[in-house]
Image: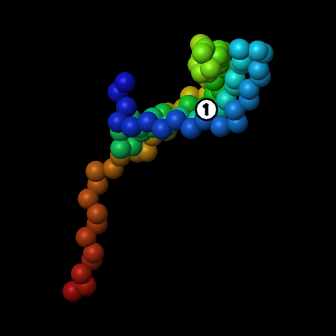
Amino acid sequence: NGYQATQHLIGTINISLQNSQATMSSYLHATHKLSETSIDVANGTYEDEVINENGQWKIRRRTLKLIDFLNLSSPTTKEKPEKPHKPN
């Protein structure tokens, strides 16, 4: 996927049951490290269709609805630190 590391956080899960089916929605915040100075950040919601098969709940379909997707970068510097000035 091209990322050095990723972290996905999910919260505020809402579930609506209809017999052996359900719908779920949850918020997503995902961070993807591209390099030492650049990350991608995604915020959105997951909309899930869930079914109960033999007593186990399984996600049948998951849809990601992005709220925003940002690339955050820091400038790189290759300057050498200044040497302290020595008085004569």
Q: Is residue 69 above or below residue 39?
A: above
Regarding residue 69, the answer to whether it shows in the image is yes
Dot 1 falls on a residue whose secondary structure is: strand
List the single residue furthest toward the left. 88
The picture places residue 75, in percent across and down from the top left corner, at 40, 45
Asked where in the image residue 79 lies, by quadrant, the reply is bottom left
The picture places residue 26, in percent across and down from the top left corner, at 67, 29
Label 1 sits on what residue type? Leu
Looking at the image, residue 56 sits to the left or right of residue 71; the answer is: right
Label 1, residues with CA under 10 Å away: few <14, some 14-19, many ≥20: some
Q: Which residue is mark 1?
A: 28
Q: Residue at x 28, y 66 (%)?
A: 82
The picture places residue 7, in percent across and down from the top left corner, at 48, 38
Using the image as rendered, state which of residue 62 and residue 68 is in the foreground: 62
- Quarter of the picture holding the N terminus: top left
Q: Residue at x 71, y 14 (%)?
A: 20
Looking at the image, residue 19 sits to the left or right of residue 85; the answer is: right
- Quarter of the picture holding the C terminus: bottom left
Q: How is the image coloured?
A: rainbow
Regarding residue 65, the answer to whether it shows in the image is no
Asked where in the image residue 66 lies, by quadrant, the reply is top right
List the single residue furthest toward the front. 54
Using the image as rendered, state which of residue 74 and residue 18 is in the foreground: 18
Q: Is residue 1 above or below residue 5?
A: above
How many numbered markers are drawn?
1
The picture places residue 10, in percent across and down from the top left corner, at 60, 35
Q: Residue at x 76, y 15 (%)?
A: 19
Q: Is residue 2 above or below residue 75?
A: above
Using the image as rendered, state which of residue 52 and residue 26 is in the foreground: 52
